[in-house]
Amino acid sequence: MPQPAPVPFSLIQFILMACIISIGMGQFIVFAVLAPLIRSVGLQEIHGGLIISFSSIIFALSSGVWGRISSVYGRRKVMQIGLYGYCCGTLLFAAVFYAGLQWWLQGTMLFLALSVARMLQSTLMGATTPAATAYMADITTPEQRVKGMGLLGSAHSLGTILGPALAAPLILLHLLAPLLAASVITLLTALVVWKWLPRHDVQAPHAPIHIGREILRTLHSYFDPRYAGTLLIGVLMFLGYAMCQQTVGYLVQDRLLIGPEQTASIVAHAFICSAIFALTAQLLVVARLKLAPSTLLFLGLPMMLAGYVVLVQLQWERDALIAFSFIGFGFGLALPGFSATASLSVSAEEQGAVAGIIAGAPALGFILGPTLGAILYEMHTMAPYAAAALLNGLLAMAVLRRNRKQKAI
């Protein structure tokens, strides 16, 4: 019986990138429309922050578990679970918002329903990124690792370009139309994975998985001394970003005195600028200059700081676009540096587990970031952005100090 032709390495990388693109598109579509949706259904800023925070707790725990599961049952299968889960979860999230827009659900019941829907979605969508990241680590050598992680970072940036770009015109049809589009895209990506991505050998195909034990192992893994310092920097970087990302919709609406549709459109375009500059940084700096991961982190953090400073004095639409261009370029440098630093700190057998930790870092930042940002925003409209700028400055100094210590050893 003839064996099927091997799948080209470039096609495998493309499929892995497609998975990250689809998740990035879906996430940034949600971020673009969440603020106007929250206000349109009669909820407050703190409710939007809490919805993201609750789901981020689930995502942070589930990502580590899914990373370990992918080492037992296979990266491909876990990626499909995540994509199908994201598709169904987004439909559920949109359905609850529709009930709120029709005033079938209001107040506390609506908030609880949205929180539960988003948490259910996060439980399953946490599977895709760690499985894809671990798959990339499996098929690349240590020398290729930064480039491989950079490709996934580029894919995420491309997703964050395409997501808001798709959301902007669909918002004119209905505020929920972008969420429905995100669901369709992840479904199509899942079918691509099922059809063309080859199965990957796993470490222990018959080892049992105990969810409770895996959650405890995941919690313990976050304190692994080999990468705990890197993880802390990444989490705090995402915390500052979450404070700004989740409140910028309110800032634009309040400073420019515009309606929810215009707000969502401006935020979508700001996210597009962010993603374009992130992709530019990854293609022109990360891929070509071959800088050390720690150097990428150090260069990226001050660029993000500059973007937060621009948000402090936002008065016009262009200010939002300029701010997120700086933030995006900085993120495009810092994220591959963070991912590669963590990946290179462990052995090949542990790539599934550390991939889950890497994927969980944004969620850890988003546990407190959105709620803290909403609280600070209610205190003063400039507070979240000033706090994020200060935090990034401290992180840049911490990275510089750590780099000097490593060179001195």
Image (tube, grey):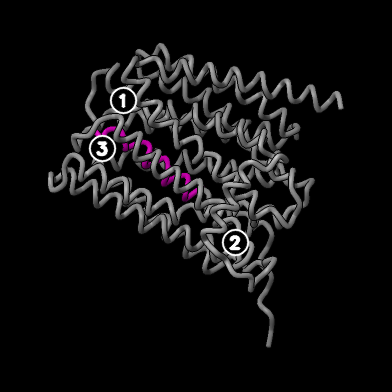
Q: Position of residue 224 (x, y in %)?
A: 68, 43
Mark nearest the camera among 2 and 3 is: 2
Does the segment drawn in magenta span residue 23? Answer: yes
Left or right, 28 with reference to 147: left
Residue to which mark 2 is pinned: 70
Q: Residue at x 36, y 36 (%)?
A: 32
* Viewer-closest of 243 and 189: 243
Range of magenta residues: 21-38
Position of the N terminus, as image quadrant, is: bottom right
Mark identifier at residue 250: 1
Residue kind at label 1, given as amino acid type:
Tyr
Query: Is any atom of residue 18 visible in this view?
Result: no
Q: Position of residue 41 (x, y in %)?
A: 19, 38
How far apart marks 2 and 1 lie (CA) works out to: 39 Å
Query: Is any atom of residue 43 visible in this view?
Result: yes
* Viewer-closest of 104 and 283: 104
Look at the picture and state if 298 lies above or below 211.
above
Q: Secondary structure beneath disc 3?
A: helix
* Viewer-closest of 165 and 247: 247
Q: How many marks?
A: 3
Q: Main secondary structure of the magenta part?
A: helix
Q: Secondary structure beneath disc 1?
A: helix
Label 2 vs 3, first from the N-terminus: 3
Q: Residue at x 35, y 48 (%)?
A: 118
Left or right, 305 with reference to 84: right
How far apart marks 1 and 3 lie (CA) works out to: 11 Å
Look at the picture and state if 308 lies above or below 224.
above
Neighbourhood count class around disc 3 (C-alpha, 10 Å): few under 14, some 14–19, many 20 upward: many
Position of the C terminus, as image quadrant, is: top right
Residue to which mark 3 is pinned: 37
Residue kind at label 2, given as amino acid type:
Ser
Q: In the orientation shown, which residue stands out farthest toward the left?
A: 103
